[in-house]
Amino acid sequence: MLDSNANIEATQQVRDLGEQGLLQRLQRFCPEDIVGDDGALLSVSEAHLLVVTSDTLVDGVHFSLGMASPGIHTTSAYDAGWRAAAANLSDLAAMGAAPLGITVGLGLPGDLPVACVEELYQGMASCLKPFNTPIVGGDVCRSPVISLNITALGQVLPHQAIRRSTAQPGDRILITGVHGASRAGLELLLHPEQGQSLQQCDRDYLVCAHQRPTPRLDVIPLLHTVALETHPWTGMDSSDGLADAVLQICRASHVGAEIDLRQIPQIAGTADWISASQALEWALYGGEDFELVLCLPPAIAQALLELIPGGAIVGTITVEPIVVLQDSAGRLPNQVLSLDRGFQHFE
């Protein structure tokens, strides 16, 4: 016989608990000694800088639970929570920072099942756990669509901070993994009939790349082992695509770049599914791969590359302030890359 209390919990909606009841339920995902006051008290190690980054993610824009856009369902609540946490940890990695914690602001419809909210938090907690990163607070409010506003806090020594504005001509452009996999995974989720030629392991990899990306915090300690502290560390993450990352770095640093399309890693197992031009388009502009794009002196870039499976050196920083995509095989004409082709809100 089913427990009557379990039946009640299974059918509870957010409005049944109210704001305080929901907050009390969600505090189970937070450290007891940190939450409960008007703010969290976190320690920053001596001589470190506090890094603060914030992202807003909205159902129907950044993930699809099937509520904001009926018929389109590419992520579970668990996956949406995971992706939200991963996006913010990726921003900390892009600054060279070690995470301290995150806060979560939730906008929720009143008729949303409480179980769905808890699943969001379970996804966030699972993504955060390998990096010992707690949820240290947040807020909830009523909203017609589900939205998450996450603020991530980290710390970094001043000379180890990664910035966009310090790239120098001659630096090599190193990427930490495959680009376009998340976009390919999204395509498979939107159109399950596609990719029939894919091996199941390759299909699973691509779907996972979209639903549960891994922030590249693992790269930062490796960078510390090979990089000179006297040389600035330049880079950002590729949440908006590889082309966007290189263009943003070049704009901030007042330099240009040459990228060799032949050096951009291919998406595994997709040769019989999508064309080379489509794979390149997704790699450059697909976004949400959450890899790092770093600009480092040649010797340091090569030393770091040897420590990162799946990484690649794809180009060089130049003096002329344009970003050119080249084909080292000479089969395709040069292309000047532009921010106009990537995803833009409000367009």
Image (spheres, rainbow, N blue to C red):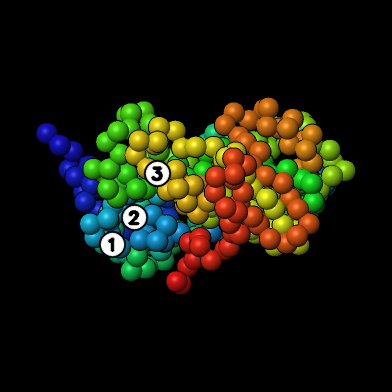
As drawn, which residue projects farthest toward the right? 230
Residue for point 32% across, 29% down: 200
Image quadrant occupied by the C terminus: bottom left
Residue 41 falls left or right of residue 16 = right
Rendered image: mark on residue 64: 2
Residue 319 at what x, y percent from top left?
A: 78, 57
Residue for point 53% across, 59% down: 55
Answer yes or no: do the residues labelled 1 and 2 have beta carbons within 8 Å? Answer: yes
Closer to the camera in the image, 292 or 138: 292
Mark 3: secondary structure? loop
Residue 289 at what x, y percent from top left?
A: 51, 45
Instruction: Mark 3 or mark 2: name the one nearer the start of the chain.
Output: 2
Q: Quadrant of residue 206?
A: top left
- Callout 1 amino acid: Ser
Q: Quadrant of residue 98?
A: top right
Mark 1–mark 3 distance (CA, rounded to whole Å): 29 Å
Instruction: Mark 1 or mark 3: name the one nearer the start of the chain.
Output: 1
Residue for point 18% across, 38% down: 3
Residue that numbered label 1 is attached to: 69
Residue 260 falls left or right of residue 4 = right
Residue for point 72% across, 46% down: 316
Answer yes or no: do the residues labelled 1 and 3 have beta carbons within 8 Å? Answer: no
Residue that numbered label 3 is attached to: 275
